[in-house]
Image (cartoon, grey):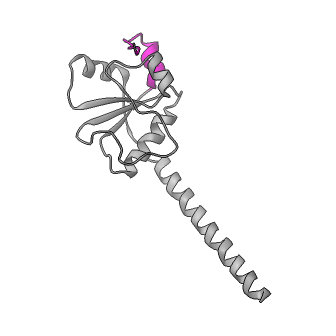
Amino acid sequence: MIKKKTIAGILTCACLLVLVSLLTLAQDEGASQSFSRIKCEELKKMIDSKTADILVVSNDPQESFEEGHIPGAISFPWADTLKVPVALPRNKTLILYCSCSNEEDSSDMAAKLARFGYRNVKLLEGGFLKWSELKYPIEKKK
């Protein structure tokens, strides 16, 4: 009787270890993906020319978005997991940005979106910090 419980415990631990390893591998695979980047200057030209096939997406927290964001951007805050269905269009190029120093949140969000089949995703090089540094226009929620 004790041997059966011990074996069952060992098998349970082994299954959990395999599951955790697979989840970690899946996370690492998404995080290591490389996404195209777009420079602030290029995005500003696209916004100024009213390019219709892009959607600028802020991955900053809602409060930060309300304090200031790139003109025309929508708020889609970074989250640990995405809620299904994802409320972003698939027929536009999504240009993601955040206020992180190395686009950490937008990179992570791009990886998550890629797992849901989004293929037209770019990251804003330098994010909102670079945009602000260049003194480009900023909208505030009224």
Magenta residues, as a range? 126-141
Point out the image quarter for the N terminus. bottom right
Position of 39 relative to 114 (above/below): above
Q: Is residue 111 above or below residue 65?
A: below
Residue 71 horizontal side relative to residue 33, left or right: left
Residue 131 magenta: yes
Image-quadrant location for residue 37: top left
Is residue 50 one of those drawn in magenta? no
User: Residue 51 at what x, y percent from top left?
Assistant: 21, 25
Q: Is residue 130 left or right of residue 20?
A: left
Depth check: give the residue in front, 102 or 55.
55
Count of marks placed on residues:
0
Quarter holding residue 54:
top left
Question: Image quadrant for the C terminus?
Answer: top left
Q: Residue at x 33, y 51 (%)?
A: 117
Residue 112 drawn at (x, y percent)? 43, 46
Front residue (pair 126, 94): 94
Image coordinates for residue 96, horizontal then vertical, percent: 39, 32
In the shown orientation, is residue 67 left or right of residue 19?
left
**Observer able to see residue 61:** yes
- The residue that appears at 29% across and 41% down in the rendered structure is 120
Q: Position of residue 22 (x, y in %)?
A: 54, 63
- Comparing 63 with 93, the one in front is 63
